[in-house]
Image (spheres, helix red, strand yellow):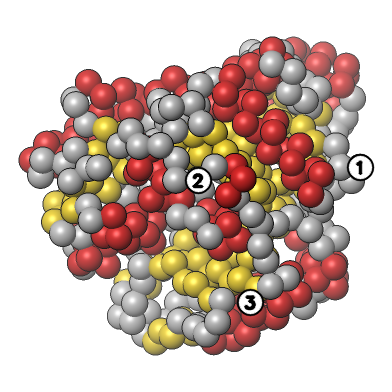
């Protein structure tokens, strides 16, 4: 096991990793920007080091600075969390050449999954169902028009290097395609420095379901059930739950087996997630693979009784998985609401100082956050300030517990999305589990 790990992140995920390290008896080093000096991840780490200014490009994405911090503090490994450089293959490669263990998959895994067009081609080769679309990247509007006519509208244009809803456009007919192509390409270049696009058939009213896996260096791979991430706004997840209301035991097993097949085919290592589109008939299609720990990983931990961060660290240290597939049992139901510092009506970011703060508690309630009273939410970073996770014996109890916990959650001084979630939990379709990726459009129309 490692003696010391540097955490190349901030906020709740940095604090989450510190907690796992403490339980494993591993020392931690927190990096921080100049304005994050008083953050909780800095306070609770064994050591801390400033790596740059507030702008993430000069601090949390400053690869030379992060590596220097690791070397100065004699850190043996780096955990990147999610976001920032967590899926940067170059960073993973540089870690290896510097003699520092990257707690995540191999650079080759990251490169393959990060290139969405290449990932599609790989899935085709190994017989995994994918949505009809381009064989690789498309280079012109004319090519996009030709493919769209073949697979029929609606279609979706995606950035090959994309993620988080960036460089993505849904097109319902040919008159929209030209503008959508140009806008998606511009956004892809701005977000990823790569303007390559691909196109595929758009499924209306699908569910978004993802499967969590763990894979060690001995070749053992397990799946830990699925998460339903259907409730989204502009392709950004808002509410996640496990298990999915749309998945039964037979489909769960099939999704898990396909996910393990994918991981084995690409010799995947560490934690990862394969995302699928699930239509109303229970037919699923590969969408993408994420080569990092997910924001929504707690719901999987709650229903399986596992610690995914500890497993990531153990795998990176060369140790075998702590679990066999037969050990993984889905028990109860867990739901997560992402608490963002945003106006609940307009979703405009709401940075500022928190003047009053109370976190919910009681049976089955977990809060992953790094904020506190008098903490200042910076405009420089993502608006996610916490995750409210609940567990119940079944979905009905989990919904009731989430409603109660949201009522107890007090954050004053800034606006948050807490009122928004309170409304969602009253929606009959959501309560019944009859919701699709267009849920918010319907929800807003009801209001």
Q: Nearer the viewer, residue 219 or 28?
A: 219
Disc 2 from disc 1: Cα separation: 33 Å
Give the quadrant of residue 74: top left
Query: Mark 3 falls on what kind of element?
Result: helix
Q: Nearer the viewer, residue 256 or 6?
A: 256
Image position of 371 with respect to 25: above or below: below
Per the image, the residue denoted by label 2 is 323
Say few, some or many: other residues with alpha carbon within 10 Å of mark 2 (under 14 / 14 to 19 / 20 or more): some
- 3 or 2: mark nearer the eye: 2
The label number, if any, that marks residue 402 in the structure image: 3
Q: Is residue 263 visible?
A: yes
Query: Mark 1 falls on what kind of element?
Result: loop
Q: Who's the residue at 27% across and 32% down the image? A: 101
Q: Who's the residue at 85% across and 37% down the image? A: 283
Task: Give the percent coordinates (x, y) of residue 159.
Answer: 60, 28
Per the image, the residue denoted by label 1 is 281
Point out the tag, 2 or 1, that comes first from the N-terminus. 1
Point out the tag, 3 or 1, that comes first from the N-terminus. 1
Task: Give the percent coordinates (x, y) of residue 315.
Answer: 38, 38
Relative to 372, 1 lies left or right: left
Q: Is residue 172 visible?
A: no
Say few, some or many: other residues with alpha carbon within 10 Å of mark 1 (under 14 / 14 to 19 / 20 or more): few
Say few, some or many: other residues with alpha carbon within 10 Å of mark 3 (under 14 / 14 to 19 / 20 or more): many
Q: Nearer the viewer, residue 204 or 91?
A: 91
């Amino acid at each position: 096991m490692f003696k010391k790990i540097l955490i190349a992140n901030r906020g709740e995920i940095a604090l989450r990793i510190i907690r796992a390290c403490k339980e494993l008896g591993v020392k931690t080093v927190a990096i921080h920007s100049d304005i994050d000096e008083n953050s909780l991840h800095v306070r609770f780490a064994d050591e801390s080091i400033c790596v740059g200014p507030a702008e993430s490009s000069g601090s949390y994405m400053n690869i030379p600075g992060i590596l220097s911090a690791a070397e100065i503090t004699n850190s043996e490994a780096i955990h990147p969390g999610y976001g920032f450089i967590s899926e940067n293959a170059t960073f993973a490669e540089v870690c290896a050449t510097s003699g520092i263990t990257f707690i995540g998959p191999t650079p080759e895994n990251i490169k393959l999954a990060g290139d969405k067009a290449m990932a599609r081609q790989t899935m085709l080769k190994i017989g995994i169902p994918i949505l009809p679309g381009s064989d690789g990247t498309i280079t012109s509007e004319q090519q996009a028009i030709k493919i769209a006519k073949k697979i029929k509208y609606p279609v979706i244009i995606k950035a090959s290097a994309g993620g988080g809803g960036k460089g993505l456009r849904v097109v319902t007919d040919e008159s929209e395609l030209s503008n959508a192509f140009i806008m998606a390409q511009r956004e892809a270049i701005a977000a990823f420095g790569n303007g390559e696009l691909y196109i595929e058939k758009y499924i209306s009213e699908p569910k978004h379901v993802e499967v969590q896996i763990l894979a060690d260096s001995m070749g053992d791979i397990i799946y830990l059930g699925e998460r339903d991430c259907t409730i989204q706004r502009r392709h950004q997840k808002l509410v996640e739950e496990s298990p999915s209301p749309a998945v039964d035991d037979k489909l769960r097993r099939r999704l898990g087996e396909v996910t393990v097949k994918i991981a084995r085919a690409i010799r995947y290592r560490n934690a990862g997630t394969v995302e699928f589109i699930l239509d109303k008939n229970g037919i699923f299609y590969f969408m993408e693979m994420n080569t990092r720990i997910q924001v929504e990983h707690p719901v999987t931990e709650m229903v399986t009784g596992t610690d995914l961060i500890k497993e990531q660290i153990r795998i990176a240290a060369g140790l075998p998985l702590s679990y066999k597939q037969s050990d993984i049992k889905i028990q109860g139901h867990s739901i997560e609401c992402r608490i963002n510092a945003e106006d609940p009506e307009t979703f405009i970011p709401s940075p500022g100082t928190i003047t009053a703060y109370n976190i919910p508690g009681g049976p089955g309630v977990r809060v992953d956050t790094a904020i506190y009273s008098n903490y200042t939410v910076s405009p420089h970073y993502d608006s996610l300030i916490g995750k409210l996770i609940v567990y119940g014996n079944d979905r009905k109890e989990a919904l009731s517990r989430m409603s109660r916990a949201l009522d107890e959650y007090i954050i004053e001084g800034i606006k948050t999305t807490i009122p928004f979630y309170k409304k969602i939990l009253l929606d009959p379709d959501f309560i019944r589990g009859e919701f699709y990726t267009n849920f918010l459009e319907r929800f807003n129309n009801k209001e």
